[in-house]
Each structure stands twice: as C-alpha cells, then as structure tokens.
Image (cartoon, helix red, strand yellow):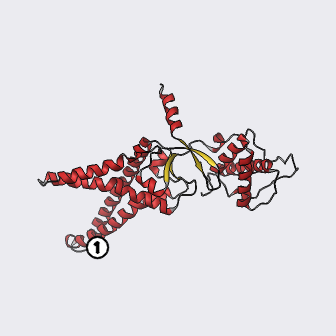
C-alpha cells in the first residue's frame, strides 16, 4: 500500500459526523494521536521559553533596582528577589493555565501548537465550547501527565541521593502509562480530559474560503425565486449571524438537495434571523442567503477579517 493510500485509509477511519444543536450534520476528521502529541510538545516548548525569558527579565530588573536604589545592594537584594519570586510564581500559575484556557476558548479553539499542526478542540455535541469544558479538560491534563512526571522526577532525585525511591517510581510510571495509553483504547483517540469535558480534537480546515466553496448549483446574488418571483435581500445584521463553517454546510446541503434537510435548515435560519417568509420557497431562500453570505465573507476576507463560525 502506498503512503498516500495509507493516509486516505487512515483519514476515512477517523471520519466522524458532528450533529449541531440545530440538527445539521457536519463531517469532521478526528486528529491523529501523533498530531495531538506534537501539538502538546510545541505548546510546552513555547511555555517554557516564555517562562525562561520572563525569569531572565526579572533577574535583570532585580539587579538594576538593587544597584541603582539601595546603598547596600547585597543586603537589600534578598527582599527584592523575594518579591520578584512571588510575582514569578503568580505569573507562572496564570501562564500555565491561561495559555491553554484563553486560546482554546477563542474562535479557533486551538493553542499555537494545535494551529501549527492544523487541529482544534471541538465540543462533541456540536455546540460552542464552554468555559467549564475547557477548564475541565485542562485541569485533567495535570492529573494525566504532569503530576506523574513530577513524581517520577522526585523518585530519580531520591535514588541519586541514596534514598529508596523504587516504589514511588513504579507507582508514578503506572499512573503515567494508564493515562498515556488511554487514547489508544477508544476509537476517537479521547484522553481522560476529553471524556470528562465532552470534547474531542479534530482536524481544522486548511483551505481558504474561495477554494473550499464551490459556486456550482448555488444561486447568484441577484437571482429571484422562480416559484414566487420574490427577491430575498438580507441586511448586514442577518448576514453577520453565520460564518464560514455554516456557509460550507449550507453549500453541501444545497448540492445534495435533500428536501427534508433543506426545510429544517430553512426553518432554523429564519428563526435565527427573525424572518417569516412562509413555506414552499425554501430552496430559493437558501440559495439567496448562501450567495449573499458568501459575498459578505469574501469581502471581509479582502480586509483581513475572518469569521470562522457563528460563535466567532
């Protein structure tokens, strides 16, 4: 089997269907375990580099303050370093947890490491990631990875100074392996934090809007309904409700032509934008909405603005 064929087979096995609260099915691809591990390693590298740089800055500040202000720098340096140590601990705490929380709660749902490798966090129920879910999955990471690694390090230090740390080492290794192997025992590669938080990590779309969305079968901005003759024109407020993800989903539904799905999506959009166009002209309404939403998003992209989805 060629490498390309193996990749396609792997991607097919990882394909899933996400159902949004509106009942819309969105195809996603579960991120590979190697991509998740790589993203974590990149994030840890960024965090460690950032903390080291801040520590060096604190040292420079402390040295400058004691040399320029105090008459006896050596005597006063202790107090200055104690104060900066406290600030460093506080900064480290917020950096450690804030790095993951702030980025995963953002519109992209991904840290810098995940963005580089093209993956993101998503809620398995298809809705928006909640702060509770992101906090839960990131707090569990400490239990899964970092606490056992700390105990493993402590066991090694104890053995180096001649104390017995064998029991602690084996217990910490068992603890670490239990959670490290957890993603290999479920088809969605979920770690314990994902199970608790109701999340999964999926591949993020890498294509640009203009390349990802085909105009085939879609109405032009100027098209009127062939059934009623009505022209549907939507304002900025109505078009600002949805983003690129919903646009791509709508295009796929229009291409597939499933009347029941189109009826359901038509009703959902009408409720969302507070329209009441009546029944019987659903496809024309959706084609006009699709065309005008696409035109708006592409125009925004020319000015460097992106709206990934309705939550952005």
Viewer-closest of 303 and 173: 173
Q: Is residue 17 left or right of residue 90?
A: right
For residue 5, say whether it is visible.
yes
Q: Is residue 238 above or below residue 222?
A: below
| Residue with the most extreme right position | 229
Where is residue 135 drawn, in percent x and y? 45, 61
Where is residue 111 drawn, in percent x and y? 47, 52
Q: Is residue 92 left or right of residue 108?
A: left
Give the quadrant of residue 56.
Answer: bottom left
Where is residue 3 drawn, in percent x and y? 47, 28
Q: Is residue 130 above or below residue 14?
A: below
**Badge count:** 1
- Count neighbours of disc 1 (C-alpha within 10 A) and say few if under 14, some if 14 to 19, many if 20 or more: few
Q: Is residue 102 above or below residue 38?
A: below
Give the quadrant of residue 233.
Answer: bottom right
Where is residue 41 drawn, in percent x and y? 38, 47
Q: Which residue is mark 1?
A: 69
SS class of the residue under badge 1? loop
Viewer-closest of 12 and 224: 12
Residue located at (82% from left, 51% from top): 280
Q: Is residue 103 left or right of residue 306?
A: left
Q: Quadrant of the C terminus?
A: bottom right
């Amino acid at each position: 089997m060629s490498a390309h064929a193996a990749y396609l087979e792997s991607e097919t096995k990882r394909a899933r269907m996400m159902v949004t609260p509106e009942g819309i099915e969105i195809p996603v691809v579960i991120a590979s375990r190697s991509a998740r591990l790589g993203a974590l390693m990149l994030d840890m590298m960024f965090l460690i580099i950032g903390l080291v740089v801040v520590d060096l800055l604190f040292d420079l500040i402390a040295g400058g303050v004691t040399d320029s202000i105090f008459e006896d720098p050596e005597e006063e340096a202790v107090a200055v370093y104690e104060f900066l140590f406290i600030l460093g601990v506080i900064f480290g705490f917020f950096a450690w947890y804030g790095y993951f929380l702030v980025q995963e709660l953002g519109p992209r749902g991904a840290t810098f490491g995940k963005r580089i490798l093209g993956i993101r966090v998503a809620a398995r129920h298809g809705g928006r990631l909640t702060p509770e879910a992101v906090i839960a999955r990131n707090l569990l990471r400490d239990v899964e990875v970092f606490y056992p690694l700390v105990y493993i390090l402590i066991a090694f230090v104890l053995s180096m100074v001649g104390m017995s740390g064998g029991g602690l080492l084996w217990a910490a290794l068992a603890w670490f392996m239990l959670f490290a192997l957890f993603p290999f025992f479920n088809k969605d590669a979920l770690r314990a934090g994902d199970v608790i938080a109701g999340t999964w990590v999926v591949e993020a779309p890498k294509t640009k809007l203009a390349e990802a969305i085909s105009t085939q079968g879609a109405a032009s901005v100027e098209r009127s309904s062939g059934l009623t003759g009505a022209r549907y024109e939507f304002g900025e407020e109505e078009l600002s409700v949805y983003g690129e993800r919903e646009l791509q989903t709508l295009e796929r539904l229009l291409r597939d032509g499933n009347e029941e799905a189109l009826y359901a999506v038509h009703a959902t959009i009408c409720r969302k934008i507070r329209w009441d166009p009546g029944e019987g002209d659903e496809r024309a309404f959706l084609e006009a909405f699709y065309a005008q939403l696409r035109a708006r998003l592409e125009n925004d992209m020319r000015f460097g603005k992106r709206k990934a989805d309705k939550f952005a």
